[in-house]
Structure formats: C-alpha cells, structure tokens
Image (cartoon, helix red, strand yellow):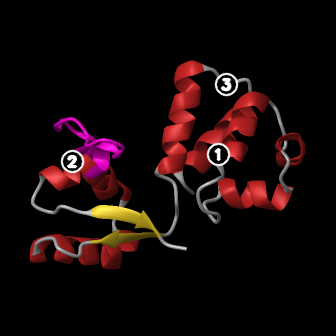
Amino acid sequence: MTPFGAKIRRLREERGLTQSQMAEAVGVSSAYLSALEHGKRGRPSWRLIQSIIAHLNIIWDEAEDLVSLSKISHPKITIDTSGLSPEATELANRLAMTIGKLDDIIVQELLQKLKGPHPSPRSGEEPALNTIRGGAAATSAKQST
C-alpha cells in the first residue's frame, strides 16, 4: 500500500463510501480504485486527484497533504545516481536489494531520518530528496514507466 492509497482508503471509509460508489463518482473503475488504494497502480493523474478532493469535500491543508502524498506514492521508482559518489550508488542499490526485508521499525527510523531537520528544498524538489542530497548519499528520483 502507498501513502496516497492508505489516505484515500481511510478518507473513503470515514465517509462511509464503498469503492464502487467513490469510483463511479470520480470517474474510474472499482478495480482501478482498489489497485490505487493497494499500491498496485502508480501515481494518479492530477485530474483524478482533483476529482477525489472535490468528491470527498477535502479542503486546504488536507487537500495539500493528499497532493503531496500522491507525489511520493509511486510503487516503482528508479533512483538515478549517475554522476554522484560511489557511496550514493551503493546506498541506492543496497536499499533496493533489502527494502523488502526490513522490519517496520527500521523502515520508520529511516523514514524519520529522511524527514528530519534539513536545509530548505531546492526549487521544485521534495523535502526528503533534499535531505538525501544534503547527506553522504545524494540521489535524484525519477519515475520508471
């Protein structure tokens, strides 16, 4: 499950909506909405995000939070370490090889480290990426298709 999928599932359930009801209201199939909630689909389109926000009557900070979560919820990513240090490439590869074996506590610790205090993000960059760039393992993430 992705952060975005978990959030829309929680919001949908809080409002007493079935997947079928919400899917019809936002213009997607129930199967697609289920796959999105379970992290089997990539990042949703801007139009779909806006439809979900409107249908669930989400405003301000919560809408902004949902948009931010969609940006970090692609279940398959590629990390481009070309031109970076050998340590950055090693970190990216070791994480890719072991992430499925890490227990929840370790994942939470690593995530908190990435979310921790850091300098201001570069223009258009997610804060977590900026944190990584500021450390020994500079990386840039781009979507795989």
As drawn, the label of residue 131 is: 2
Amino acid type for the residue under numbered disc 1: Trp
Identify the secondary structure beneath mark 1: helix
What residue sits 18% from the left and 54% below the top?
Answer: 133
Q: CA distance from mark 1 to mark 3?
A: 15 Å
Q: Is residue 54 above or below residue 7?
A: above
What residue sits 55% from the left and 74% below the top?
Answer: 145
Identify the secondary structure beneath mark 2: helix
Identify the secondary structure beneath mark 3: loop
Name the residue that disc number 1 marks: 46
Spot the residue most to the top.
Answer: 60
Q: Report the magenta residues as a range.
A: 112-129
Q: CA distance from mark 2 to mark 3?
A: 29 Å
Amino acid type for the residue under numbered disc 3: Ile
Q: Earlier in the sequence, mark 1 or mark 3?
A: 1
Name the residue that disc number 3 marks: 58
